[in-house]
Each structure stands twice: as structure tokens, then as C-alpha cells.
Image (spheres, helix red, strand yellow):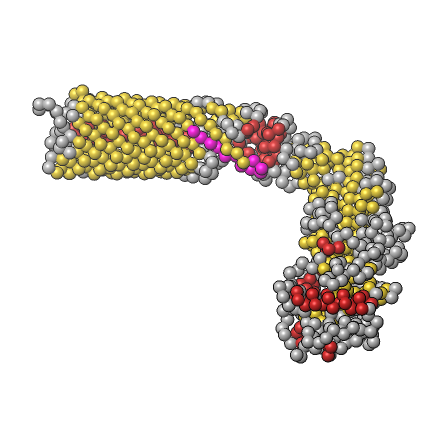
């Protein structure tokens, strides 16, 4: 009720407002469908019939300007046309109806899907489910019976599980637009029953259809202009994904060369996200001022047409209809916009092809910018940019860079395959000042005098010295120059053979790399290629051994911890010896205790800030030591000890680290009186190192591993004098320590050609110390508690920086690597508390903080000693 419009389209159109178009007496109609249903079809296909039985299948179509009127009235654009049509035809807005197919049909096969299928009249009183079927005048009984069977079948489906909004009132239901008559009245609908003969008149991608508006001859936006009707040209001023053009797809292709068919992409037009442009016939002009870009799928389901932005088929055969064979008909493209594809930007399979790139135009293909087959082809470059090869196939072919404005060709040179972006044509002319932009690809490095063929012709007109080379900015060590040899043009590399020596930060390493750059093969060539492309010459420093002082400072720090363990033990003896109660302990008879046994656990944390080429590090040292000693007299003690320590050295890169296991032994003695003391300690350590070095730049990501040993020797002297004043013990002291660290030579593994053979290393330290201790003994029931603070200044007279000499296992000269100069002075402050019990047990807790330039450490220990 209330859903019957005042009028619907009737055929023939008595008022002349419906825009009905006929060809040879047949009416042009259109349907929205899916391109997969027509992938093997073409315009003018002989014997084509509507799919399926007449009793169960039909094509639903609209006529005249009805679709155009509906789309324009509802704000159509290239993004919404598909779903707008689907809604306007009463279908779910799935966006899957990607094709519009036009038929030329004898009107006897056209029916209105109402109880009275008469197309020549609008009889709303006879429409609706409650009305009887009425056979129109002139319709055969067989046709009427097929219609009734189809209508009944469709009604059961659409009102059943199919759930389709079938109004039975002669128009499509405009889905999702409200429920008043004005909201739901879509388009007048007609059906063509299955097995009815029709001529395919036009095949369009749905989104391209709205760019065909014409008056039957030319593009037009006049009131009577309609989309399609076999019109074979397109004017694209918005987004579209796919364009099919030519005699296979549209009936009304132009054959006269003076008025060629056109595909015009205006400055606001884009072709992207679908199949791109498929131009089936000759005599087409593609004029691009917009953008044709992106990956593309198979064009009209034709194998091998993926990732081609613009494909000219140039078909002159009769397999797919009547071709254009007019003399002088060509494939023509003029570009001032952007045409790009990850594969081929422009391809012409057959016919003569003329391509012009003007100023501001870009033609870019991952493989080919332009590729043609057999034909006489011409490429004219008046400016703009061309990226990718140009191959004009066989025929009389010409590439002409005119110099009308500066043109740029972007050339990719691949060292791995010894190939380059190439212009291949019979005659090539390149104007002066043409820019050749170079990009280097592949994994191997470019060597000095490597050459790449970029123009292959039989006639070459170019002056190499007048061409402008824009080198690859990611390879500052490489420059190219053009070299002409007969009718071929090459780009030849010139390598700065001192680049890494001057810029890496390690001249010795750099000289070795520069020497390898022109001879390395295999893996090392790939490493150098990645290093060259890394963007930073200093990335080369990842190839050198670690010289950040970490192993040295951890080694010296470990032996210092063991030394201080012994010094702490001696201090306990001295403290007990000067106690008011005298030396205490457990012994037989009344003799004082002479033997002592002790154990100590210690730990320290070191932090080194980045300096020079060192990224800095942190080190954690944990260990334990123990010993046994004897008082040989009231003023002399002798003992020995040993222990184990574990060091963990870590950098900001978790894959660059060193772990060390240290096994220590020492002998010690102390000469002391009531106020003075002199301590001596001799130590030896055997160390095992487990290290890794991270190498990561470009495509290289490796971890070189090493496992090696080392030895350490130390001699330590310390002397002091104790002043007592008002209960305080004030003890100025001096110390001197000599230490030598030897690191065995080692070879790395797991990093292929950039593994290193590293020579043995030796480091020395002669460190003085000047400071004082301040303590205040407290007596409690024959036991003492001694709080203490202490300060000390250390000075290393040698201050060895880490140095290593190494050779790559992949070859090359040896090179040296120097670390930073470590500071010689450091400052220590700490506190200790000691408990001397009456039963001969002494315990201490100690904390020290040490600081020097760009570095600091925390250290602590706990010590227990028993006299017996």
C-alpha cells in the first residue's frame, strides 16, 4: 500500500525521456554482475544466450538512462559506485559486483517481473502477489509459461531462504534507504529469461563505468548523457581500480586514426587497487595527468598480466571480436603524471607504440618502466623521471631524450647478477645534462672499475662527459662515471680505496678493509657490501675485537678483591694483637693462639661510561677466598690463601659480553710492632674467558664467539703507622702494587669470514696508594667492636690502554685496535666494622666506593677469622 509509483519506464518510450538506445533495432540494457562470470566472453560473441533454464534463471536489467539517473541522484563517485548500485538493485552491499555488462536484446525477450509482464505499459493495478498472471498481447504461450514458472520460482526463493526484496511492483527496492516510496523506489527492472539470445554490447569494470558518460559520440555531462552504451573511452577524474577498454569490451570503438579512443586520467584521477589499465585494441590514446600505481592483479583473468600498470594488448586477431586494423593505428601514451608498478609500468604486447614522458611525469617499474614486443616503437622523454629498464623488443625502435627539460633516469646496478637497469633499442639519443641517478642493489660490494651496461643499441648518440651522474648517497665511497664503447654506454665505478682508513675510527682496521674491498669474494664480499650500505663508516668498528678495558679492569679488579681479602685478614690480626686484653684465642695450656683460619665472600659492581669507540660496560664480580696462617713470632705472621671469582662483563648490546672464571692463589706475610706494620702479598691467577661480539649492520647479524685463557701475577706491599689519640686509632698508610695480565691468543667462531684470530695481549699496572684509616675501638665484655672509615688515593703509573692485533679468518692484512687511555687516578672511600670476640672469632663487614673519570665501582665483603 502506497508503494506504487506514478510511472515506470515503458518500452518503447512514448515520452522520449527515458534515453533508450537501440543498435540495429535491438535495445541496449545493462546488468550488474561479477567479472568471473564473463571472463571468457567478448563483445559480439556469436550465439551468446542468457545463462540457465528459462524456468529458473534470468538476467535482471535496467534500460535507458535509468541507471545513470539513479547514480547521479544519489551522489555516485568512484569509491561508492559498486555498493550504491548493489543497494539500488536490492542486493546486499557486499561490493562484489565488479562488472557491468550491457546487452543488445530484441525487445520480445524483455519482460517486466510483475504479474503482467507487458513492457509497453505501466499497469500497477495488475501488479502484486494477489493478482492473477496476465499474458501480454503477442507473447507466445511457451514464453508466458516460462515466465510464470520463473516468477513463481523466484518468488519462493526471494521470500524464503534467499530473502531478496522483490517488490513485484516493477521496480528495484533501494535497500537501506528508508521505507517510504521515495526512499525505496530504485530503478525500473526488467528480466531476460535464461536461454534468450542477446548480443554482448559492453563489458565494464563497475568503478570505471561512471567515467564513460557520453552523448553517443563524445564525452558529455549534458542532461541527456548516459554512462556506457558501448562507449569505448574513459575520462577519469576520481578513483578507480580497473579499466577494460577496446573492441573486446565495448562495441563502439573508434577505428579512424584521426579520432582515436581515449583513456584520460585527469590530475585528480587515480587508478589503484585493482587490475590497472587493460587496453585491448590499437588506436587508443592514454593521456595521464593523474596517478596509476600499486600492485595489480590479473587483468580480466589473463595469466601473466599481474603487476603491469598499463597493458596494451594491440590485438588485431579475430578471436575476441572485430579488431581495429586501420593503417596508422597505434598504442599511444602521453604522461605528465605518475605511472608506477612493482613489476612493469607500461607494456605493449603488439602493434606500434608511441610513449611520451613530459616534464613532471614519472614512469616507474620494479623491473621495466617500458616493455614492448614486435613493432616499431618510439619513446620520447621530454623531461620527468623514468625508473626501470626500457626494452623496445624487435622492430625499428627509438628512444629519444630530447633535453626539452631536464630528464632523470634512475638506474639500479646489481653487483650480484652483474646487471643494471638498461635501455635497449635500435637507436638511442640522450641529450646533454640528462641525469642518471644510481642505486646499487645486491649483497656483494662494488669494486673499483666495476662496470655496468646501461644502454644497448645499434646507434648511440650521447656524449658521456655531458651527462650528470647522481651517485648512490648510501655509498659515499663509490662514484660512477659514464663510459661509451661503440654503441653501448656503461657506468664504471671508482672506489675510494682509503675510505674506511679515513672514516671508520680505526685507521688500521680501515686499511685492512680497504685492501679487501677490491679482492674479497664470497661471504666477505657480502659483509663489505652490507657495510658499504650501512650508512655509517663507523659500523666497521663492530668488526674489531673488544678493547673497552672490560676484561682488563675486571681482571685487575678481581685480583684486587683477593688482595684486599688478605689485607683484611692481616688487619684483623693486628687489631687483635693491639687489643687491651691482648691476643685471644683457643689453645692448649696458657699459650696464646698462633694459627688462624679465615674465609671471605666478596662482590663488586663496576660501571664504565662510553668513551671513544667503546660503548661502555658494566661488570659484576662475585667470589670467595679462604686462607690459613700462623704467627711465627709476636711480630711476624706468614700464610697462604686461594679462591674463586666469577666476572660478568656486559655492554649495551646483550650479545657483546665477556664472562671470566678466575682461580687465585697467594702467599702473604706481615711484619708488625705495637704501632707499625708492613704487609706483603704475592698472587697468581688462572683465568678462563667466554666472550661474544655482536656484528650487526645492513643484512649482517652475527655473533662471534671465543673461548680462551689468561694468567695474572701480582705483588703487593702496604705499610702504615697507628697513632692513638683520645681513643681513636689514626693510621696513615701507603701501598704499591704491581700486576700483570696476560691474555692468550684466540680464534673466534660462528661469524664466518669475519671471525678474528687475535694475538696474545699483555697489560701491566703499577699502582700506588696513599690514604688513612680512622677507627674507634669499643670494648664490651672482653670483646671489641671497631667501626672504621677509610680513604685512599690510587695512582697507576703505567695506565695501559687495551690494544689488540687481529686478522680476519676470511683474509686480509692484520690490524691493530687501540682502546681509550684509562685514567690513572682514582679515589676510594669506605667503611668497615669489625667484631673481635673473646673466644678467638673475628668478623668484618666492609663497603668501598671508588670513582675515576667516567667510571665508578661499588665493592663489599664479609670476612670471618678463627684463631686456634
Q: Is residue 842 left or right of residue 704?
A: left
Q: Quadrant of residue 668?
A: top left
| Closer-to-camera residue (704/830) | 704
Task: Specify the quadrant that holds the N terminus.
Answer: bottom right
Q: Which residue is found at the position 82% from the left and 68% from the top?
A: 140
**Horizontal and vertical percent for residue 648?**
39, 34
Tell me: 304 left or right of 716.
Answer: right
Q: Return the residue found at the far left.
A: 590
Is residue 658 part of the magenta span, yes or no?
no
Please report the residue visible at 44 percent of the width from the left and 22 percent of the height from the top. 744
Tell me residue 528's x, y (percent).
60, 32
- In the image, taking residue 657 as reference, residue 468 lies left or right, namely right
Quarter of the picture holding the C terminus: top left
Evaluate whether residue 396 shows in this view. Answer: yes
Where is residue 591 shown, x and y percent of the image? 10, 23
Residue 393 figure quarter: top right
Taking the spot 59% from the left edge, 40% from the top edge, the residue there is 535
Q: Is residue 770 above or below residue 64?
A: above
In this picture, which residue range is highlighted in magenta? Answer: 690-700
Please determine whether, in this image, residue 40 is positioned above or below residue 789: below
The one of 239 and 497 positioned closer to us in this rendering: 239
In the image, residue 318 sits, relative to residue 419, either above or below, namely below
Q: Position of residue 34 (x, y in %)?
A: 71, 57
Determine the main secondary structure of the stretch shown in magenta.
strand
Quick check: can you spot residue 277? no
- 160 vs 703, nearest the viewer: 160
Instruction: Identify the residue at image location x=63%, y=40%.
Output: 474
Amino acid at each position: 500500500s502506497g508503494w506504487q509509483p506514478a510511472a515506470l519506464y515503458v518500452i518503447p518510450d512514448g515520452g522520449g525521456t527515458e534515453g533508450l538506445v537501440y543498435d540495429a533495432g535491438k535495445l541496449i540494457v545493462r546488468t550488474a554482475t561479477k567479472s568471473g562470470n564473463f571472463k571468457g566472453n567478448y563483445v559480439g560473441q556469436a550465439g551468446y544466450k542468457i545463462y540457465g533454464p528459462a524456468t529458473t534463471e534470468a538476467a535482471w536489467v535496467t534500460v535507458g538512462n535509468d541507471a545513470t539517473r539513479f547514480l547521479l541522484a544519489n551522489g555516485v563517485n568512484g569509491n561508492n559506485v559498486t555498493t550504491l548500485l548493489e543497494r539500488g538493485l536490492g542486493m546486499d552491499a557486499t561490493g562484489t559486483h565488479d562488472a557491468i555488462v550491457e546487452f543488445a536484446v530484441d525487445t520480445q525477450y524483455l519482460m517486466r517481473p510483475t504479474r503482467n509482464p507487458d513492457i509497453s505499459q505501466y499497469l500497477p493495478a495488475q501488479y502484486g502477489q494477489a493478482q492473477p498472471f496476465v499474458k501480454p498481447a503477442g507473447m507466445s504461450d511457451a514464453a508466458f509459461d516460462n515466465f510464470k514458472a520463473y516468477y513463481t520460482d523466484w518468488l519462493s526463493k526471494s521470500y524464503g531462504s534467499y530473502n531478496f526484496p522483490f517488490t513485484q511492483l516493477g521496480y528495484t527496492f533501494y535497500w537501506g534507504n528508508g521505507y517510504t516510496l521515495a526512499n525505496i523506489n530504485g530503478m525500473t527492472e526488467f528480466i531476460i529469461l535464461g536461454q534468450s539470445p542477446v548480443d554482448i554490447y559492453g563489458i565494464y569494470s563497475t568503478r570505471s563505468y561512471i567515467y564513460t558518460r557520453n552523448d553517443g559520440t563524445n564525452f558529455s555531462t549534458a542532461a541527456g548523457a548516459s554512462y556506457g552504451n558501448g562507449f569505448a573511452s574513459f575520462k577519469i577524474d576520481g578513483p578507480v581500480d580497473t579499466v577494460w577498454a577496446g573492441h573486446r569490451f565495448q562495441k563502439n570503438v573508434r577505428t579512424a586514426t584521426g579520432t582515436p579512443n581515449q583513456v584520460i586520467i585527469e590530475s585528480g584521477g587515480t587508478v589503484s587497487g585493482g587490475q590497472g589499465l587493460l587496453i585491448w585494441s590499437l588506436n587508443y590514446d592514454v593521456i595521464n595527468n593523474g596517478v596509476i600505481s600499486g600492485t595489480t592483479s590479473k587483468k580480466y583473468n589473463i595469466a601473466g598480466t599481474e603487476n603491469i600498470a598499463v597493458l596494451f594488448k594491440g590485438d588485431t586477431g579475430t578471436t575476441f571480436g572485430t579488431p581495429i586494423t586501420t593503417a596508422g593505428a597505434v598504442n599511444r601514451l602521453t604522461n605528465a603524471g605518475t605511472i608506477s608498478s612493482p613489476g612493469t609500468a607500461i607494456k605493449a604486447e603488439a602493434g606500434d607504440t608511441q610513449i611520451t614522458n613530459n616534464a613532471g611525469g614519472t614512469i616507474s617499474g620494479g623491473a621495466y618502466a617500458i616493455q614492448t614486443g614486435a613493432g616499431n616503437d618510439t619513446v620520447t622523454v621530454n623531461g620527468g623521471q623514468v625508473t626501470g629498464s626500457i626494452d623496445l623488443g624487435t622492430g625499428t625502435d627509438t628512444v629519444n631524450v630530447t633535453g626539452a627539460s631536464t630528464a632523470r633516469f634512475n638506474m639500479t646496478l646489481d653487483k650480484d647478477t652483474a646487471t643494471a637497469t638498461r635501455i635497449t633499442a635500435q637507436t638511442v639519443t640522450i641529450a646533454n645534462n640528462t641525469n642518471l641517478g644510481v642505486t646499487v642493489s645486491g649483497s656483494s660490494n662494488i669494486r673499483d672499475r666495476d662496470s655496468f651496461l646501461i644502454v644497448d643499441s645499434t646507434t648511440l648518440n650521447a656524449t658521456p662527459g655531458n651527462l650528470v651522474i647522481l651517485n648512490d648517497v648510501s655509498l659515499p665511497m663509490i662514484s660512477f662515471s659514464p663510459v661509451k664503447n661503440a654503441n653501448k654506454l656503461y657506468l664504471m665505478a671508482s672506489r675510494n680505496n682509503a675510505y674506511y682508513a679515513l672514516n671508520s675510527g680505526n685507521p688500521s682496521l680501515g686499511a685492512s678493509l680497504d685492501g679487501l674491498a677490491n679482492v674479497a669474494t664470497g661471504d666477505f664480499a657480502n659483509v663489505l657490501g652490507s657495510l658499504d650500505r650501512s650508512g655509517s663508516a663507523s659500523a666497521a668498528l663492530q668488526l674489531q675485537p673488544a678493547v673497552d678495558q672490560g676484561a682488563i679492569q675486571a681482571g685487575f679488579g678481581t685480583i684486587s678483591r683477593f688482595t684486599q681479602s688478605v689485607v683484611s685478614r692481616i688487619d684483623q690480626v693486628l687489631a687483635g694483637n693491639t687489643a687491651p686484653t691482648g691476643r685471644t684465642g683457643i689453645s692448649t695450656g696458657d699459650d696464646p693462639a698462633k694459627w688462624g683460619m679465615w674465609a671471605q665472600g666478596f662482590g663488586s659492581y663496576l660501571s664504565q661510561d662510553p668513551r671513544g669507540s667503546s660503548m661502555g660496560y658494566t661488570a659484576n664480580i662475585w667470589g670467595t677466598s679462604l686462607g690459613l696462617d700462623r704467627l711465627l713470632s709476636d711480630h711476624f705472621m706468614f700464610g697462604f690463601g686461594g679462591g674463586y671469582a666469577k666476572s660478568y662483563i656486559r655492554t649495551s648490546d646483550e650479545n657483546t659480553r665477556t664472562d671470566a672464571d678466575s682461580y687465585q692463589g697467594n702467599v702473604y706475610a706481615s711484619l708488625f710492632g705495637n704501632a707499625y706494620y708492613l704487609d706483603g702479598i704475592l698472587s697468581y691467577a688462572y683465568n678462563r674467558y667466554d666472550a661474544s661480539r655482536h656484528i650487526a649492520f645492513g643484512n649482517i647479524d652475527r655473533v662471534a664467539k671465543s673461548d680462551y685463557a689468561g694468567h695474572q701475577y701480582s705483588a703487593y706491599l702496604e705499610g702504615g703507622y697507628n697513632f692513638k689519640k683520645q681513643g681513636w686509632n689514626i693510621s696513615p698508610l701507603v701501598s704499591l702494587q704491581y700486576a700483570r695480565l696476560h691474555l692468550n691468543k684466540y680464534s673466534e667462531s660462528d661469524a664466518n669470514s669475519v671471525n678474528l684470530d687475535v694475538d696474545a695481549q699483555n697489560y701491566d699496572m703499577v699502582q700506588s696508594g696513599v690514604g688513612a684509616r680512622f677507627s674507634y675501638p669499643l670494648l664490651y665484655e672482653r670483646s671489641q667492636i671497631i667501626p672504621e672509615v677509610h680513604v685512599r688515593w690510587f695512582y697507576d703509573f703505567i695506565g695501559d690502554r687495551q690494544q689488540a692485533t687481529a686478522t680476519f679468518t676470511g683474509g686480509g692484512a692484520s690490524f691493530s685496535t687501540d682502546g681509550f687511555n684509562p685514567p690513572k687516578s682514582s679515589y676510594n672511600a669506605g667503611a668497615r666494622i669489625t667484631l673481635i670476640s673473646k673466644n678467638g672469632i673475628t668478623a668484618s663487614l666492609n663497603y668501598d666506593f671508588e670513582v675515576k673519570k667516567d667510571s665508578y665501582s661499588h665493592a663489599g665483603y664479609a670476612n670471618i677469622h678463627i684463631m686456634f
